[in-house]
Image (cartoon, helix red, strand yellow):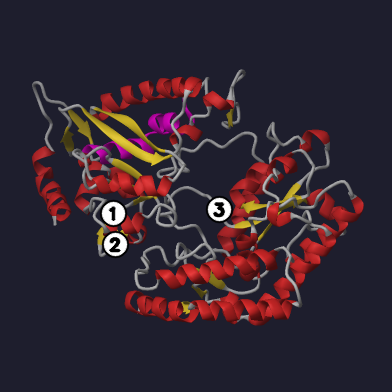
């Protein structure tokens, strides 16, 4: 109720603040031709986000940037920004605890619906309801840049709680980066486009380059491998956030009927188990893969010691580019990196939710209207955006003759990488982004265009599962699935593929997978039907 009254008070009192002050007062344009907002009081806005606090030279460089940024914020809205770091160790627990204190220590909150508990925190009263009038008045550029349909995805119980990162192209769907030049040598003229092609590729690498480990996995990729296989052999669309195994979801042709392919599609999972046993026999990974915690596969890919890296598209955009770390392109003029994305065979591509990165306002903020004004500048004002996202031009970045972003002479990534310090993942804006000159934009733009033709929007962005009564069964099911997919995904199981899959499915049933499915379906029916 306190939160509701605060939102109502702000909405009703805005008219009093929409005045051009004279004398000792100050005012700031809101983006409207006719409205101005009282900014006579200087305030400090705290921005809370996940990231380790820089030290030493990095902290000094960050302070230099913040001094410049705060001078602009002070001039434009008489406010300054303060950074509130939530370190990566136990980050989620510390993040939620800080919000729950409701002591006014934070104003802007970087959040996410799929990995930073955006909806549970909205439900628990940690975030301020943002009325349309508030957004139009205090964050007018942001309001105008988000469509009505997108604002709907930012609502919980009919109220807006989030400002989405809706205008930034990023793809975190997983797949395999691989040496395209070696795939062509293997007879795959167009590269790898299926799991069967991947098998052909791995066989060739093992034979033609005996000193190369095809994929030096550290044994933690079992879940993504299984998810990738299912995406490539069905039209399954998993619901994020229920469990790490992504077991429950709908299908592209029936989004709101809960299914569990790993449990119900025996033939598909048997074929997966067979192929992974084949990969194990080929020698795709080390024999001790499940204990291979010292693997540095990604770094080894960069220098040509391995033939594949499993991760998401954003990682591939770096691996396929001639950065200083990717010495394979310096050592071999013919080197190329392709990407086989999971779901390619079935054209099963789901866009990242626009609330994968979002900004909220703490319900305990003492200056929510000014917090919105600061966010509007950080997201939409080119000068502010470049500072918080890239740093000081000439120190942390430069722009070349083609308008691309480069690093200056003497750049030190340990101290000068501002983007790595500010974690600006909640308001990136392609209208202001400066493309990295080291990236292979021809290849990246081609793949992104392919994704755009195939994608469906993530359909479950507003689904907040009620799990109190089924949490124990979810945990049991996820533990069972994890134990079996570790064995299956690396071919480290005894007996036949049919036997291990039957054993897994029986254990999933015993753990309560059917009960969870029924409970989730009831929640889907209530929300979507």
Closer to the chain start, of discs 1 and 2, is 2
Label 2 sits on residue: 156
In this picture, residue 199 sits left or right of residue 437 = right
Mark 2 neighbour class, 10 Å CA radius: few under 14, some 14 to 19, many 20 or more: some
Q: Which mark identifies residue 508?
A: none
Closer to the chain start, of discs 2 and 3, is 2
Residue at 46% from the left image edge and 70% from the top image edge: 474
Would you say residue 49 sits in the magenta stretch?
no
Residue at 65% from the left image edge and 64% from the top image edge: 486
Residue 27 appears at what percent x and percent y? 17, 29
Q: Main secondary structure of the magenta part?
A: helix
Q: Quadrant of residue 231?
A: bottom right
Q: Which residues are magenta?
A: 370-391
In this picture, residue 132 sits left or right of residue 446 = left
Marks 2 and 3 in Cβ contact (< 8 Å): no
Label 3 sits on residue: 171
């Amino acid at each position: 109720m306190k939160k509701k009254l605060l939102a109502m008070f702000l909405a009703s009192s805005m008219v009093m603040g929409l005045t051009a002050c004279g004398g000792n007062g100050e005012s700031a344009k809101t983006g409207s031709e006719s409205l101005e907002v009282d900014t006579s009081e200087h305030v400090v806005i705290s921005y809370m986000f996940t990231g380790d606090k820089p030290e030493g030279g990095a902290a000094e460089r960050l302070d230099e940037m913040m001094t410049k940024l705060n001078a602009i914020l002070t001039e434009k809205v008489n406010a300054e920004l303060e950074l509130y770091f939530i370190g990566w160790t136990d980050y989620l627990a510390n993040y939620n605890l800080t919000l729950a204190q409701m002591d006014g220590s934070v104003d802007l909150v970087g959040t996410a619906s799929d990995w930073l508990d955006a909806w549970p925190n909205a439900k628990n009263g940690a975030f301020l309801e943002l009325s349309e009038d508030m957004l139009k008045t205090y964050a007018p550029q942001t309001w105008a840049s988000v469509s009505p349909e997108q604002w709907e995805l930012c609502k919980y119980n009919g109220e807006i709680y989030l400002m989405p990162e809706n205008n930034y192209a990023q793809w975190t769907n997983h797949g395999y980066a691989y040496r395209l030049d070696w795939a062509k040598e293997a007879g795959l003229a167009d590269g790898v486009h299926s799991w069967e092609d991947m098998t052909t590729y791995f066989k060739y690498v093992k034979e033609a380059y005996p000193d190369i480990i095809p994929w030096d996995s550290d044994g933690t990729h079992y879940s993504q491998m299984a998810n990738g296989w299912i995406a490539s052999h069905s039209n399954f669309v998993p619901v994020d956030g229920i469990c790490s195994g992504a077991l429950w979801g709908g299908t592209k042709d029936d989004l709101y009927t809960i299914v569990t392919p790993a449990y119900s599609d025996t033939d598909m999972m048997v074929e997966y188990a067979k192929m992974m046993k084949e990969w194990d026999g080929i020698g795709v990974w080390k024999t001790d893969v499940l204990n291979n915690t010292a693997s540095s596969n990604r770094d080894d890919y960069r220098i040509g010691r391995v033939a594949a890296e499993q991760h998401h598209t954003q990682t591939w955009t770096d691996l396929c580019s001639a950065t200083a770390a990717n010495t394979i392109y310096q050592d071999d003029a013919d080197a190329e990196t392709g990407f086989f994305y999971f779901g390619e065979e079935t054209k099963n591509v789901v866009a990242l939710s626009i609330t994968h990165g979002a900004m909220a306002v703490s319900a305990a903020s003492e200056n929510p209207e000014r917090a919105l004004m600061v966010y509007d500048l950080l997201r939409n004002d080119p000068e502010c955006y470049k500072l918080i996202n890239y740093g000081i031009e000439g120190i942390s970045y430069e722009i070349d003759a083609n308008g691309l972003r480069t690093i200056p002479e003497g750049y030190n990534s340990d101290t000068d990488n501002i983007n790595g310090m500010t974690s600006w993942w909640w308001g990136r804006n392609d209208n202001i982004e400066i493309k990295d000159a080291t990236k292979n934009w021809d290849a990246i733009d081609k793949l992104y265009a392919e994704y755009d033709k195939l994608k469906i929007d993530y359909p479950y962005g507003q689904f907040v599962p009620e799990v109190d009564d089924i949490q124990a069964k979810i945990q049991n099911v996820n533990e069972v699935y994890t134990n079996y997919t570790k064995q299956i995904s690396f071919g480290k199981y005894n007996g036949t593929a049919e036997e291990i899959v039957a054993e897994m499915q029986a254990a999933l049933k015993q753990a309560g997978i059917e009960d969870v499915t029924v409970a989730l379906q009831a929640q889907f029916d209530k929300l979507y039907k």
